Image (tube, coloured by chain):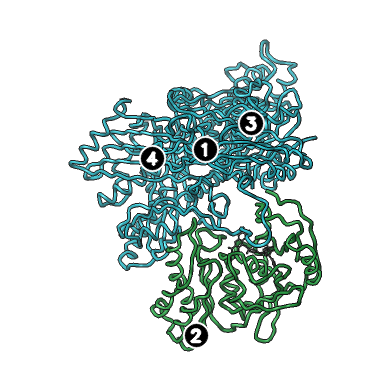
Chain colours: A cyan, B green
Amino acid sequence: MTAVEDRPDTDASSAKEIGRDRRRKEDQRLITGRTRWTDNIALPGMLHLAMVRSPFAHAKIVSIDTEAAKAADNVVTVLTGADLGEAQGVCINAWAITTEQVTPTHVPMPTDRVAFAGETVAVVVARTMAAARDAAELVDVEYDELPAALDLKKSAADEVLAHPDLGTNKSAFWKFDSEEAGTGGNVDQAIEKARGDGIVIEREYRQQRLIPAFMEPRSTVVDPTGEQITMWSATQIPHILRFALAATTGVPESKIRVIAPDVGGGFGGKLQQTPEEMITFAVARRLGKPVKYTETRSESLMTAHHGRDQWQKLTLSAEKDGTVTGLKVELTADLGAYVSLVGGGVPVLGAFMFNAIYKFPAYQFNCQTVLTNKTWTDAYRGAGRPEATYAIERLMDELAAEVGVDPLVVREKNWITHEEFPFTTVAGLEYDTGNYEAATEKAKASFGYDELRAEQQRRREAGDRVQLGIGVSTFTEMCGLAPSRVLGSLNYGAGGWEYASVRMLATGKVEITTGTSAHGQGHETAFSQIVADRLGVAFEDVEILHGDTQISHRGLDTYGSRSLVVGGEALVRAADKVIEKAKPIAAHLLEASVDDIEFSAGRFGVRGTDQGLAMAEIAMAAFAAHNLPDGVEPSLDSDATYDPVNFNYPHGTHLCAMEVDTETGGVLMRKYTCVDDIGTVINPMIVEGQVHGGLAQGIAQALWEEAVYDDSGTLVSGSFVDYLLPTSADTISFDVQHNSTASTTNTLGTKGVGEAGTIASTPAVVNAVVDAVRHLGINDIQMPCTPERVWRAIHDVRGSGTTDTEGAAMPHFDESTGMQGTTDRTDGANQ
Amino acid sequence: MIPTQFEYLAPTSVDEALAALAEHGDEAKVIAGGQSLLPVLRMRLNAPEVVIDLGGIEALRGVREDGDALVIGAMTTHHAVLHDALVGEHAALLVKAEHQLADAQIRHRGTIGGALAHADPAGDLGAPALALGAEFVIAGPGGTRTVPADEFFVDLFETAIAEGELLTEIRVPKHTGWGAHYEKFVRVAHQWPIVAVAAAVRVEGGTIAEARVGLTNMGSTPLRARSVEEALVGQPATEDAVASAAARAAEGTNPPSDLNGAADYRTHLAQVLTRRAVLAAAGA
Ligand SMILES: Cc1cc2nc3c(=O)[nH]c(=O)nc-3n(C[C@H](O)[C@H](O)[C@H](O)COP(=O)(O)OP(=O)(O)OC[C@H]3O[C@@H](n4cnc5c(N)ncnc54)[C@H](O)[C@@H]3O)c2cc1C
């Protein structure tokens, strides 16, 4: 792209760090826990909070009696929403996807009505965490239960209202039509034509509700005792959080400092302005004392935002030979009880991705977002794109089955060939680079595709109890969020730029500030590698500072695989400014003309001579400022704010072999190969970690994870006994490879990798499971593909494989013998 | 979450423990490895005022022989049982089950006595204990009594251990030379079984001479599949013969329906897993 052309290139000799398997410098402190996790922070006089939460999905709050709790030992006070009033602010929705969007006001602690089980109605403040928890059980809340809107489809039909005052559960309807947008043809005509002389595939897929389940539960500490109010929070978005705090509480932004210290995972789950953060902020301000709130795992599973939860109605049209002619998508998306920070924007992020790598001439996307009385939903690793990828990659397998060819054959027939880049899609995006053919060839060879197909055939013919299935997913995604103008056109409340600064210290060390906010990704290592190469300094001499609005004052944080492709570009540009600022100083000291100064491998040399000065020497000279050219400021420090010109489009071919025990329905992964194109790789080891974790999460959606509510709106899968997170014992060794084509949207040629594995793997796994039993007449199994669902698909007369999950947990910890438990439904949510 | 406050007692003998139980009555709870009790306390499903830790009673640990039986102290950890040579030789079925019980960390803390006293119908040790005809030695204020496995499991989380009593030993009749297998069906590793089948068989010249089959999670207690056992005796250890006996596995069961499967699915699993367990135990 033009913006990057006339800037200094990293010449090959100085690329010592990029591409190197550096061990992550942050790991020792993160793994040993000897670091500043928010919950490790203890301030003098700090008080502790416990939330009193609603056990009901929907109820009127009749009364709240806090007297007994207030009288308990070590309790300082108990506050309700009425006590805090407007000081608690509101939780904002930053992305109203339409101007008519119906958005219930989200007060952190409601005073009149609760809208989901787990919503906070009172907060206990005590001198110890234990005292706060004990006293929370003494708060007596009287509720008047209301009918709850739980089932997504029924809620979309307004059978029961999640918020009676709004008159409807329908929050917003968002549509993209290629004919209207001028990016393609009329989809209804394409489908009509195919009904006559082609193929029409119609399917309805379920994206089950998922829980991000980050390792570190959310925790917030607020210290109101300085000139600024400081909030430490386990968040992905310190900058956005500061904005939201200021915008909704009336405290000036300049009086708020938000720090995201080390944060233990997020996966989108900490991309939120939470009620708990708002309550903690309000309590600290009210009492004038530092306070801390750390959630329990049960609270985390129940109340931290969930992800996915859609019904996808899909219609694909094609010619008889499998050439696609149209795709129509009708989504119903569950928002939960409130429209969260990004909220309805998550399905919209998928709107441009259903057409994926295929050349659809006509495309239409419709999405209805719906309010229910369940935990709110928002971004979860991939956010919108896994849903889209799942739908299209499942459909391409169905199309192949209909045409009667190998799934890779229909894909190849329809995908964009590598000569066709840059390619403008039917959704209006311009894909910069990629090579689907090469990635696929490499994946097939490494996977042993033909051999596994032959084995599958043998097993089918022999009628083996254990059948083999092969699943394909040739995914792409859009990441690197995001060009600010595009976000503006989508009515998003902010931009998508990123910021970085370089501070050259007198001693030759380099401090980098970045507006991205790492929470496990390894930015400190990868960014140091980039800077070391760019400035020609040692890796060890670079320090990455982030996650503090006073240190890194500008930024839009970390999500949407943006940190490297957007934040990294800002970093490169800031570093290049340092070089440009250093050149006149070097020229002056070397008594040469600026035009003769060349910068290479950390040294400013005079062309045609062996004279030169190292970056550190210039930094010292700038610091001393004794001998600088006239009019040159005594500083090399530089910064840059970069607004991306385009999204970023990693892609890859994922191949999965699954064994299905047709007797029990049990499934077992046999082999998983992926060849991803993520452009230039900065640190292969970190990338491999991102891919492994991403794959595990995507596979988990296919096979294990599901947030289940019972008929009264209680989260049944409320602990890890019932919400099945895989461990390393459940996954196999993945075969992870790359086929890189450099991105042209950023200087280093990088593409995002944080979400790729999750986006790609889910359909690969489900395609493999379905493929294993397709010859038995099965063409779908609802996620997660539990053994029971697989078994029912095979054995039931109905053959649906989509039985509703039973709404009951396994009772391993019920203590029905012995004495009465102290817990009743009122504080049941507080465990 | 953290437990409510309690007083902590650490007796060093069974008598001391019984005295503490007598003194505190239903306000006390004993703790063995804590792997089931601590979650209960942390989730505040129970809030005892006194917790009596059996960890200091050395007499409750270890495995010894007593004639035709092995005697396993209630406080013997899963890990110790798993690696005990006597258990391996005379009660291989227990080893097979222990091997698949939870994960290494939990096996190092959790105890065989605690697991059996907790009586989770999905616990992995009840079915093997039943199948092997174990006896439970229970100490109380009035002395010691021995309860056969068939009478030990009363209901969901309920055993023959009465208030004020302690499980001290598990006596397991030796099944030397028997083939054994524990077939556990789970969705992820380290999970309680959806259904599991414990099988021990004695094969003589290709024919099943004796068989013991226990079922996990097919009712509110572990169950013994007696009709399968009867049908197996005298049969050749072949797939067909075992399958037809295994078809009776769900007789008299009352499996639960939950997130991992409805009752009819569990019924089906019980039959398939019984066939697999018996065949594996028979070495077929
Ligand atoms: C994550 C996790 C996974 C697990 N997975 C499995 C699994 O796959 N399969 C499985 O079978 N189990 C599993 N368990 C449970 C494990 O087996 C426990 O070790 C066992 O259930 C309890 O043993 P304990 O020694 O820890 O007993 P504790 O937790 O200390 O006690 C359990 C109960 O028994 C009572 N008790 C203990 N000892 C005695 C005694 N001597 N006399 C009278 N009462 C007594 C206690 O009062 C308490 O009510 C799992 C546990 C966890 C935490």
Residue A290 vertical placement versus B268 (above, below): above
Dot 2 lies on which element? Answer: strand
Tag nearer the camera, 2 or 4: 2
Give the foreground label among 3 and 2: 3
Quick one: A92 or A600, which is closer to the camera? Answer: A92
Let me know if marks 1 and 3 both belong to one chain.
yes
Q: Which residue is mark 2?
A: B203
What label sits on residue A485 in the rendered view? none
Figure check: A491 above or below A119? above
Residue A626 versus residue B234: which sits nearer the camera? B234
Q: Cβ–Cβ below 8 Å for labels 2 and 4? A: no
| Type of amino acid under label 1 | Trp
Are tags 4 and 1 found on a single chain? Answer: yes
Mark 4 / mark 1, whichever is N-terminal = 1
Q: Residue A81: which disc? A: 3
Position of A702 with respect to B157 (left or right) is left
Q: Which residue is mark 1?
A: A376
Q: Are callouts 4 and 3 both on one chain?
A: yes
Task: Label 1, secondary structure: give it.
Answer: loop
> Can you tell me which quadrant of the image ligand 1 is in?
bottom right
Answer yes or no: is residue A680 visible: no
Badge 1 crowding class, 10 Å Cα cut-off, few under 14, some 14 to 19, many 20 or more, is many
